[in-house]
Amino acid sequence: MSGHDKPFWKQVLIVGALSLVISTSTLAAVCEAPRDNGIGGTGVQPDTRDQHPAENGIGGTGIQPDAGKPGDKPLENGIGGTGLRAGNGIGGTGRQQPTANYAGRVLFAKGGIMAWQPDGPARVLRKGDPVCEGDTLAVADLALAQLQMADNGKLMLRAKTRLVIDAFRKPSTMDGSERFAVTLLEGGMRAITGEIGHAHKENYAIATPLARIGIRGTDHEVFHIEQARIDLAAGTYNRVLSGGTVVEAAGSKLPLGPTEVGYVGPNGASPTLLKALPALLGTSAAELLSTSRKSTPGVEDTTSDDVVQALKLGSNRTVVNLDGTELVFAPPQSAYVGVNQLGGKQQYAMSASVLDAGLEYALALLDPSTNIPIAMADGDTGFNYISGDARLVKICGAMMDNVPVYWGLYANGTEGGFQIDPDTGDDQSVKVHHFAYSPGGATSMEVINSISGTFTFERLVGHSRLSDESGALGGRINGMSVDVMFGGNPGITRYQINLTDAQRREWSGAMDGFKSLADFAAGKLQLQTTCVGTGCGSGQGNGVATGMLVGQQGKGLATGFGLSTQTGQTVNGVAVLSRP
């Protein structure tokens, strides 16, 4: 399956999943803090041929000089020279020279986030990577980024944003030489000022192609819309969350205070005051202030919740419009259990994930017409699935412990669904994807730790249609029982399942012992498996199970399983259980 053959929005999903499951970066940073890794020269020529050192030489710098075509930059980690002409020369320092000023680092980056210098190659940005003066940053569709600047300020970048760090200077003391200047070319961002701009506010500025925005100790949002959309005019928008800004354009200035919104239209327009930020750009300022910034705002008050709240386009989910297709992020604290039935030696892959508010560890994208996941990725386990043109087969649901739970599977299609290999980045075909999904329904660890005792989950609420190695769907779960120990060291102490597949083979899988909830979620619970009936091959084998607790009081259990024989027969599915 070639990436060139996929519709645009499916290619975007692949980029998002890749960013979660592949964590290596191949390009070196361009603005690391200086380090003394070179070897300084002595400024002295060594004795050769019994001659005394010559005088007045200058020791080397520890930087390799230009070698090659004009314009090549010096290489780092060179060895300082010896001062070949003098005994009284000046020894080299051996100090690496940064190629750009360090401006900050990435707190999180989910989706495709790129940066490049004017004369350098593009590099992928990941959590912890530096950003530099002169960088152009590009945030792809469905991507999110938060930057921690070197002066303790923060920038939160929305999807489809391009930003240039024009200038960043942070001296040891704010003596007036400090400087922060960025240009928002398109997209949206939230900025919280740090040390730069407190003493000399004139040295802090955000520009767009239409306006310049100064600050007065500020937390604010800036958007620049290049082309008009339905219900959204082209231009620059600035909304103040706390403090104040001054929007300058066409020789006019517009001061803004908390909750106020300024707008600058194209064609040399002056800034004007709006009643509210357009709905397509975000939640209301009042909602932002009342939810996550109730106290006097400061840099130390900013949390990932603030970032997500600022980036959200809906009250409980993030909506992104891609090429005319509306895509929705699953709400935070959602539970997702997935099982991928594969071909070849790796018969299945599975994982259970809590979808987090910051999109930091795991995310799922929903079909806005059904609110059912069409893609998901877990950065911790590497598990992921993109539905492609696979068909959603028989979705079911129920209320359990005051939360909704849905289960079903994806199968068939011209190309079908696929997963991305976290090691190679290659597409791998997925025959069938089983899932259980509870929006906002994952049981918190605080609740799990507060409950004492071991509980048996054996009431079968429902299960997906079982799939076997031939791709046949059908069969039933005859019985299932899982013991879960709550408290300070929660885990699974017993797991048993008996089922009949579409070929009328009877399967059993069992585990007695202990497996922590974390290992259970990661798909590390091993089962002893038997298969009885025609077509069972060896009849003996192993299996794997995954799952997690759902519900406000942990009264539900969503679990996925894969059973197999030593000769390659398999059966897979997900089930939802409850306890009293």
Image (cartoon, rainbow, N blue to C red):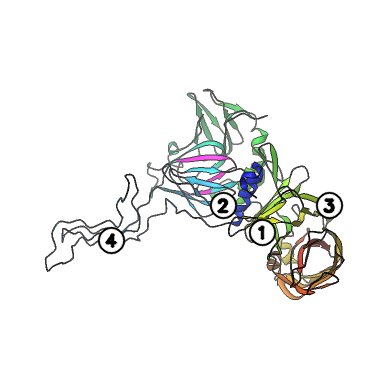
Look at the numbered discs 3 and 4 and tell me whether their residues touch, using CB distance below 8 Å. Answer: no
Q: For this rendering, which residue is in front, 85 or 518? A: 85
Q: For this rendering, which residue is in front, 114 or 391? A: 391
Q: What residue is shown with label 1?
A: 383
As shown in the figure, which amino acid type bears the numbered disc 1? Phe
Tell which residue pokes out farthest to the left in this image.
51
Tell me the CA gap for discs 3 and 2: 37 Å
As shown in the figure, which amino acid type bears the numbered disc 2? Phe
Tell me the CA gap for discs 3 and 1: 23 Å
Q: Is residue 325 visible?
A: yes
| Label disc, if present, on residue 394 of the rendered structure | 3
Q: Secondary structure at mark 4?
A: loop
Residue 394, given in percent of the width and then of the height, sits at 83, 52
Look at the numbered discs 1 and 4 and tell me whether their residues touch, using CB distance below 8 Å. Answer: no
Tell me the CA gap for discs 1 and 4: 48 Å
As shown in the figure, which amino acid type bears the numbered disc 4? Gly
Tell me the CA gap for discs 3 and 4: 71 Å
Earlier in the chain: of badge 3 and badge 4, it is 4
Q: Nearer the viewer, mark 1 or mark 4?
A: 1
Q: State which quadrant residue 225 falls in.
A: top right
Tell me the CA gap for discs 2 and 4: 37 Å
Q: Is residue 219 visible?
A: no
Earlier in the chain: of badge 2 and badge 4, it is 4
Magenta stretch bounds: 147-165
| Label disc, if present, on residue 108 of the rendered structure | 2
Earlier in the chain: of badge 3 and badge 1, it is 1
Q: What residue is shown with label 4?
A: 40
As shown in the figure, which amino acid type bears the numbered disc 3? Lys
Residue 310, given in percent of the width and then of the height, sits at 62, 43
Does the stretch in magenta take in 263? no
Residue 158, given in percent of the width and then of the height, sits at 59, 42
